[in-house]
Image (cartoon, coloured by chain):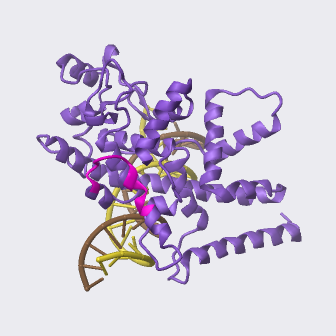
Chain colours: A purple, B brown, C yellow
Amino acid sequence: MPTSSKARAKRRIAVLEEELEMIRQEKGGKQRKTTFYVSQGRAIRRLVVLYHSVEDMIAENDRRYEFRSSLESTAEQDRLQRGYVELTRVLPWLHERLGDLDQGDSEDMLRKASNLKKGADAARGDDTSSLKELVATWVNQEFRPSPLIKSNEKYSRGFASDICGMLLCPAEWDWKQNSVKTGIRDRTTEYIVSENSWPLFLYENYQVNSDDLEEGLLKSKLLVLAFKAVFTSPSSAREAEGDGDGADVLENNRRARLRSDQTKVKTCVASIINMKKVTPRAIAYVVCQVRFALSSVLSWRTVDADFDYEAFWCNIVDFFEDTPGPVTRRKVEKLLEWWTR
DNA sequence: GCTGCCCCAGCTTTGAGGGA
DNA sequence: TCCCTCAAAGCTGGGGCAGC
C-alpha cells in the first residue's frame, strides 16, 4: 500500500523520538534491549488498572468528550474514566500525544499501546512470581504452620491449607468452626467465597470486629510487607518487618530523587514509576497479588472458583474512589493518610 | 568482587479456532 | 470428539546496573 511522504516523515520522527527517549534512559551506559513504551507500561497494572486495557480507558474518555451534553454513565464507565485520569497522571506524555494524533498515526499508536500492555503484563508477572515466594516466607514467620508453606509451589496453599484458608476466609465467618471450614472446602451453597466479602488477611492483626467490618480493614502487616516488596524492594520489606504504616514505602523514592542530579543511586520501583504517594489503585493491586499468592491457583487468571479477581479489584477501588458520603470519604482519606504518612 | 534488584528474552503452558 | 496449529499469556533464568 502506498504511503504519503508526509506520513513516512511522521513515522520517522516518531522512531527518532523513541530512540531519543532510549538514549536519555541509558545516559551513556551500555545499550540495553528495552523499548521506552514497554518500560513505561510497567506502571499500568500496578497503579492504574489490573484488568482493563489502555484502549478501554481511551475509548471511555473519547466517549465522554464526544457526548458531553447527553452523557449518562455506569459505575464501570466512571471507574474507567477515573482510570484514564490516573493513566495521564502516571504517563503524562500520553494524553498530549493522543491529542496530536491524526488518521495516519493510529497504527503507530496501536503498536505503542501493544508495547505498553506488554510491559504492564510483564511487571504483573514479575510481582506474582516474587510474591509467591515472599508471601510463603512471611506466613511461615508469622504463623509457624506445620507443615510450613513451601515457597516454590502452590498446591499446599488455598483453602486446603489451614493457615492460608484462615487468611482467605471471609471476615464475617469463623474459620475455626469445622462447619465453616468444611463448607468452604466443599463449596456448599451456604459457604460460597466470593469477591463480595473482605478476606481476613486484609485486617489489622488478622482480627475483625463483627460490629464494624471496616475497623482495621486494609491495615494488615501482610499487605504492608507486600506493598513494600512491590514498590520499594523485597529487602525493604524484610528490614521493616511490616511495623507501622506505609511511610517508608516512599522514602526510597524521596532519597532517589534527592540525589537525582548528583551521583547515580539505586532506584526502586516507586521511583522508576514516579510514585509520590500511596494510591487506592496501588493498594488494590497489592491486595489482589497477596490474595493470589495465598491461593492454590498456579497461573494468573480472573476467576478462582467462585471468586472473581476483577470484581474484587473493582470493589477495593470503589471502596476508596466511589464513597457514598462525606463521612465515608473522611474515613477513606484517613486510611490513605495511614498508608502515606 | 559480591550482592540485591529490575526487567528482559526465551521457553513453556494454555486456550481458541478450524479441519477431519 | 479428537487432533493440530497458532497466538497469547505466564514463568523463569540470567543480564545489566547500582551500592557496598
Foreground residue among A135 and A333: A333
Q: Is residue A300 left or right of residue A191?
A: right
The answer to whether one can see residue A70 in this image is yes
Residue A25 image point, x, y percent = 56, 74
Write down the quadrant of residue A190 in the picture. top left
| Identity of the residue drawn at 24% across and 19% down | A180
Q: Is residue A177 left or right of residue A94?
A: left
Instruction: Report the magenta residues as a range.
Output: A240-253
Foreground residue among A185 and A237: A237
* Quarter of the N terminus of chain A within the rendering: bottom right
Q: Is residue A267 left or right of residue A184?
A: right
Residue A330 image point, x, y percent = 50, 31
| Identity of the residue drawn at 63% across and 40% down | A82
Question: How many numbered circles does the render carry?
Answer: 0
Q: Is residue A204 magenta?
A: no
Foreground residue among A151 and C5: A151
Residue A230 image point, x, y percent = 39, 54
Residue A118 image point, x, y percent = 55, 56
